[in-house]
Amino acid sequence: MNPTQKRELEILATKARIGTIIGTFNAKSGHPGGSLSAADIFTYLYFCEMNVDAANPQWEDRDRFVLSKGHCCPSLYSILALKGFFDFDELEKLRHVGAMLQGHPDMKSTPGVDMSTGSLGQGVSAACGMALSAKINNQDYRVYTVLGDGECEEGQVWEAAMFASHNNLDNLVVIVDANGLQIDGTTEEVAGIEPLDKKFEAFGFETIKIDGHNFDDIESALNKAKEIKGKPTAIIAKTIKGKGVSYMENQVGWHGKAPNAEEYEIALNELKAKLADLEG
């Protein structure tokens, strides 16, 4: 990836992080930490990887995306807005009664959302169904799903993993946003889920470990996934919870808490300063 392409993606990811802060502040609730950690992954998927059309969200041959960790939708919404599915101003109405953007993705009301999610562990099963449907109907679309590392404590994740491997779903890519933190503490303190890559390998996946904030790494992993035949791919993306906002980074308390007015200004100032530097 050349420097210009990388800078353009960094600009988009920074705008997505700004949207996350705007949305959660105006909602007075939400999940900024995991939204910020996944912003680079969402950015690459929608602006480099996936074949989607904002003017035709239900296009039959589009690639599918399922946000299995549905509570981290603020940055996904930001990316969908930047891609043109709806106006960026909608983020100011996040979680408001009657607004388009709910606290978890809603496929019935939000253009660009392929699956309603929120109950952890279930999104990856839906993604498996989409991938199997493509196989049965001889369609070429690919399916991507993002999980949280804490979410991987859910048994349904591993049931889905068995299903994906058994059905040779090489059109499925599971991306784990491995930021190391969940609502009750570190993932290691709560359940000791490592080594995740070896677990997915044991369930029949090709596994790739990357820096989830490095666009070269993301590009390389997704390109490799396209070459894998006969089995699904799991990308374990090491990330920083709260990435981009100094006081949120690696702080478990920002899993599910909105910034107050003072914190909002600090976060926006930091992100806008980064954006100005990238655009300058």
Image (cartoon, rainbow, N blue to C red):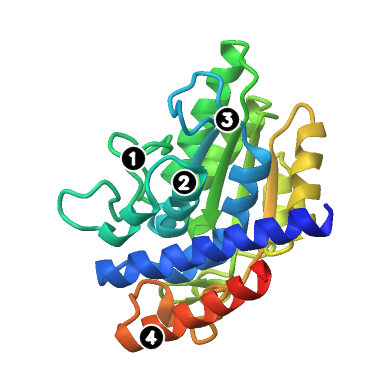
Crowding at mark 1 (Cα within 10 Å: few <14, some 14-19, many 20+) = many
* Element type at mark 3: loop
Numbered label attached to residue 63: 3
In front of the other: 184 or 146: 146
Mark 2: which amino acid?
Answer: Leu
Up-down relation of residue 280 to residue 209 (above or below): below
Name, please, the residue furthest toward the top: 137
* Nearer to us in this view, 195 or 226: 226
- Position of 160 with respect to 89 (left or right) is right
Q: Which residue is mark 4?
A: 263
The first of marks 2 and 3 along the sequence is: 3
- Cα separation between marks 3 and 4: 37 Å
Callout 2–callout 1 Cβ contact below 8 Å = yes
Q: Which residue lies under the disc numbered 1?
A: 110
**Residue 65 drawn at (x, y percent):** 52, 38
Q: Label 3: few (<14), some or many (≥20) within 10 Å?
A: many
Q: Residue at x 76, y 49 (%)?
A: 219
Q: Which residue is mark 2?
A: 80
Evaluate whether residue 53 shows in this view: yes
Indicate the secondary structure of the residue bearing disc 4.
Answer: helix
